[in-house]
Amino acid sequence: MPVYTKEIVVTAPGKATAEFTQQIESALRESGLSEGTVTVFCCHTSCSLVIMENADPSARRDLEGFIDRLVPENDPHFTHTYEGPDDMPSHIKMALTRTAEVIPFVHGRLCLGTWQGVFLWEHRERSHQRRIVLSYQGE
């Protein structure tokens, strides 16, 4: 079964989501594959991936606000604070969410729902450039 792998860089403003579905679709076209799956993997420990509503940004803001309330900064029990008050909370948020997604594709198109998009979810206060590995397997 043929495999096509590509590494991309996605930048998200601090503590926000950034959609990069188009980059996944573009690399699928480059692969020449028609049917199979793509594994989307984030190579970091303080951000994550989410397939989420891409039509109304308030859905993502509500999700972001919820996880901030769930894992607040400046918790006096955290000892891993070398990089600041958002350091340990960002690692916990990553552990509670996902660093990989597997998405099927058919006829050269991702099988996402009408309002679904793939987002990098940055959990740190400041913007970062994040490495994402796309691994397509199929025919």
Image (cartoon, rainbow, N blue to C red):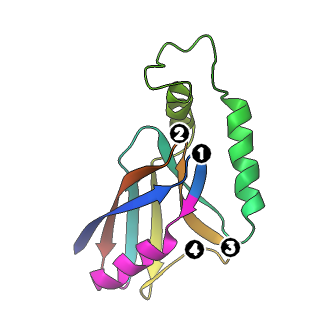
Query: Which of these two is toward me, 45 or 99?
Result: 45
Query: Which of these two is toward me, 2 or 52?
Result: 52
Question: Which residue is disc 4 drawn over?
Answer: 112
Q: Position of residue 20 (x, y in %)?
A: 49, 67
Q: Which amino acid does the dot numbered 3 rest on?
A: Trp
Residue found 35% across the figure and 47% down from its top: 43
Of callouts 1 and 4, the N-terminal one: 1
Check if mark 1's residue and mark 2's residue have beta carbons within 8 Å: yes
Check if mark 1's residue and mark 4's residue have beta carbons within 8 Å: no
Q: Nearer the viewer, mark 4 or mark 2?
A: 2
Residue sitting farthest toward the left: 2
Q: Say if residue 33 shows up in the picture.
A: no
Of callouts 1 and 2, the N-terminal one: 1
What's the distance in space between the residues labelled 1 and 4, CA to CA? 25 Å
Q: Residues within 10 Å of mark 4 (few under 14, many from 20)?
A: some
Residue found 53% across the figure and 34% down from its top: 90
Question: Which residue is disc 1 drawn over?
Answer: 15
Question: Which residue is disc 3 drawn over?
Answer: 115
Q: Which amino acid does the dot numbered 4 rest on?
A: Leu
Q: Position of residue 26 (x, y in %)?
A: 39, 80
Question: Which residue is disc 2 drawn over?
Answer: 124
Give the residues drawn in magenta, as a range. 18-34
| Callout 1: SS | loop
